[in-house]
Image (spheres, rainbow, N blue to C red):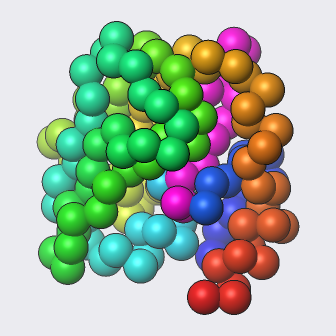
């Protein structure tokens, strides 16, 4: 399982990366391996507001449909358009090619409340 040390993680298996004043969000390597082959990704529109712990989109695999939960609140400033044509990026490259959205956070310090890679690894190893 790949959990980069420079990211923060949510209990719902999203990762977060601070980039200047914005935050990039995607799903973890653990999540994509549990879901299996991703066949469709649904994301919100640019400009949409997302709220922490509430669904903002979904990923569909050959096994199931899973909601994407916002790790923090903010406004969508960019979505990964490539995922509509290439949902397999989620399986191939969850941290590089398959980021989901970039948000302008309501409060960037909310990221501090998310798990470190060590805490996330400990959580998923308990399951």
- Residue 10 at least partly seen: yes
Percent of width and height locating residue 109 = 79, 26
Percent of width and height locating residue 91 = 38, 64
Asked whether residue 48 is drawn in magenta, I would say: no
Please state if 119 lies on the left or on the right of 62 as rendered. Answer: right
Please state if 125 lies on the left or on the right of 50 as rendered. Answer: right
Q: Residue visible at 76% across and 55% down?
A: 115
Q: Nearer the viewer, residue 35 or 73?
A: 73
Percent of width and height locating residue 51 = 48, 31
Give the position of the C terminus as an image quadrant. Answer: bottom right
Please state if 57 lies on the left or on the right of 32 as rendered. Answer: left
**Residue at the far bottom in the pictured view:** 126
> How many tags in the picture?
0
Magenta-colored span: 12-23
Q: Quadrant of residue 56?
A: top left
Percent of width and height locating residue 25 = 53, 39
Q: Nearer the viewer, residue 120 or 95?
A: 120
Please state if 48 lies on the left or on the right of 77 as rendered. Answer: left
Give the position of the N terminus as an image quadrant. Answer: bottom right
Q: Residue visible at 82% across and 38% down?
A: 112
Q: Is residue 58 above or below residue 45?
A: below
Q: Is residue 12 above or below residue 109?
A: below
- Residue 87 at least partly seen: no
Q: Residue visible at 49% across and 41% down?
A: 70
Q: Nearer the viewer, residue 7 or 124?
A: 124
Q: Is residue 60 above or below residue 57?
A: below
Q: Quadrant of residue 117?
A: bottom right
**Magenta residues, dominant SS class:** strand
Q: Nearer the viewer, residue 68 or 88?
A: 68
Q: Quadrant of residue 73?
A: top right
């Amino acid at each position: 399982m790949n959990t980069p040390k420079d990211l923060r993680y949510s209990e719902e298996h999203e990762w977060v990366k601070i980039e200047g004043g914005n935050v990039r969000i995607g799903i973890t390597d653990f999540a994509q391996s549990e879901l299996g082959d991703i066949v469709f990704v649904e994301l919100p529109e640019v400009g949409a507001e997302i709220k922490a712990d509430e669904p903002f989109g979904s990923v569909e695999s050959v096994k199931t449909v899973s909601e994407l939960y916002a790790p923090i609140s903010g406004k969508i400033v960019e979505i990964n358009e490539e995922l509509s044509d290439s949902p397999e990026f989620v399986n191939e490259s969850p941290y590089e090619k398959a980021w989901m959205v970039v948000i302008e956070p309501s409060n960037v310090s909310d990221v501090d409340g998310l798990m470190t890679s060590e805490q996330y690894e400990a959580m998923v190893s308990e399951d």
